[in-house]
Image (cartoon, rainbow, N blue to C red):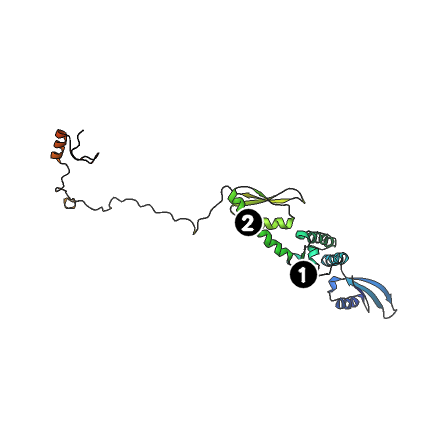
Amino acid sequence: MESIEITAGSVKEALQKGAQQLGISEDECDYELVKESGLIKKKYTVKISEKPKGEKAALEFIRGVIARMGFDCTVEMKKTDDGFLYEISGEDVAHVIGYRGDVLDSLQYLALLVANAVEGFDGRVIVDGENYREKRVQILTKLARRLAFKAAKSGETIKLEPMNPFERRVIHSALSEDKFVSTHSEGEEPFRCVVIVPDKHPKRERKGGERPRRERRERSENAEYPRVSESNIKYHTDMDLYDAEASRNFKKKGFGKTKSYGVSKRRF
């Protein structure tokens, strides 16, 4: 930690000057009285430094580890809504990320321990390199949706490979609103994995909302119906529905045109 010595007529005055030189507020200063001189007009020499903070301790730790590994990278810290983001960039950033981010995850875990060791720190620590986290989220989201479709189509449970807590949260979040599958985690760390289970009875929503109910009409006693009169009935008097003479000939002679054979003058 950077520290400076300020000599002033009072400790408060020295603290104000020291905070101004360090570019921080007085509340963020940690001071120590070095010596007191003078009989009538006293002078106070105060050693002033910035109070240790968890986020800055984590930043120094990450920079130190990368320097000891011999990689050419730079680290920048940004404040987020729920913690601090440490972005790593440079020519050797791929070595810091590692295989599927395993080195990056280990560095993030150790940086969190260093930050929590400082009293008063409360927040998340995220270590990222060349926007690797966001790219990994996109890849896992596509994988989750593809495997969910496969599980729902085949009806078989799919068990993914072991993942870290961050990647498991991405899978659960991507399929949280899926109506055809459900997810849960199984196993113990570091072999804990996500399981995708198809739903046997998925809930389907009708497009356009619910089907409107058809109103049932009841007959009323006063309902009018069309009247039937003799003039509306047509009589087919001109049509010979039964040929009596053809029937007599068939019984006597045994021949005639029949439906069975369709041949005239055939005896039985």
Front one among 56 and 189: 189
Circle 2 SS class: helix
**Distance of label 1 from label 2 (alpha carbons):** 34 Å
Can you give x and y, in whole percent of width and height, for residue 49 in the image? 78, 63
Where on the picture, by quarter, is residue 46? bottom right
Residue type at mark 1: give it. Lys
Decide which of tag 1 and tag 2 comes sooner along the chain.
Answer: 1
Task: Give the percent coordinates (x, y) of residue 52.
Answer: 75, 58
Residue depicted at x 84% and y 68% = 43
User: In the figure, is residue 145 to the left or right of 55?
Assistant: left
Q: Residue furthest right?
A: 39
Q: Which residue is labeled 2 in the image?
A: 146
At mark 1, the secondary structure is strand
Label 1, on which residue?
78
Residue 81 as seen in the image, left or right of residue 72: left
Residue 53 visible in the picture: no
